[in-house]
Image (cartoon, grey):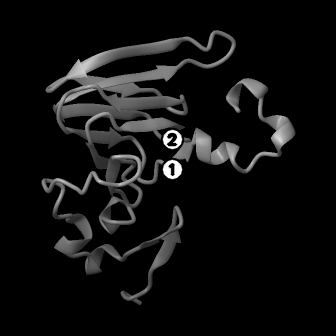
Amino acid sequence: MLNLSAMLNGFICKNPMLAEANDFHYSGLDEPKNRTTQSGVIVTPVSVAQVPGLNTLGISMARVDYAPGAVNPPHFHPRASEMLVLIEGSLHVGFVTSNPENRLIQRVIQTGDVFVFPLGLMHFQRNVGNGNAVALLALNSQSPGITTIRDAEQNLPEELIPRHYT
């Protein structure tokens, strides 16, 4: 009976008696990632998919590496608020409030600064410094999800995309 497991939140919930250190460990978040991708932004997630022990704990994090001039395009997390801590560089960050105001809340942040993106609001980051930038993110969900606006738009019928976007 001790070997039985259950699914919870879409992930295996291991019998606590069988838990081991590897279920709660991730290594490599200190390593710079290759920023020579098309976008110049690399996200290294640390969520329940990488650390099974996060299941039901309601937290996750990520490292984001930005090449000079790189943009993490407008996106939102349907299941999490996000706290960004800039550990290297300068970023222009911001989010758009919900209807009916749709106000842009933005600023340039520097190494050591923190910026918060509320749950479900569209937000972005852009490296405005002369070198690379690195941020650590804390999210209040084990599986925050992400919807990137431009990727979601590609799945809409053309008649639903406002003309000023094309």
Label 2: few (<14), some or many (≥20) within 10 Å?
many
- Residue at the limit of the structure toward the right, as seen here: 159
Q: How many marks?
A: 2
Tell whether 160 sits left or right of 51.
Answer: right
Tell whether 38 sits left or right of 28.
Answer: right
Q: Residue at x 36, y 77 (%)?
A: 15
Q: Name the residue beneath numbered marker 1.
A: 145
**Distance of mark 1 from mark 2, alpha carbons?**
5 Å
- Residue closer to the observer: 51 or 101: 101
- Residue closer to the observer: 142 or 131: 131
Q: Amino acid at mark 2?
A: His
- Up-down: is 116 above or below 41? above
Q: Amino acid at mark 1?
A: Gly
Q: Secondary structure at mark 2?
A: loop
Q: Earlier in the sequence, mark 1 or mark 2?
A: 2
Q: Position of residue 78 (x, y in %)?
A: 56, 41
Tell me whether the residue at label 1 lies in contact with that at label 2, contact meaning CB atoms closer than 8 angstroms. Answer: yes
Q: Name the residue beneath numbered marker 2.
A: 77
- Residue closer to the observer: 82 or 6: 82
Q: Position of residue 139 (x, y in %)?
A: 37, 41
Q: Residue at x 67, y 16 (%)?
A: 99
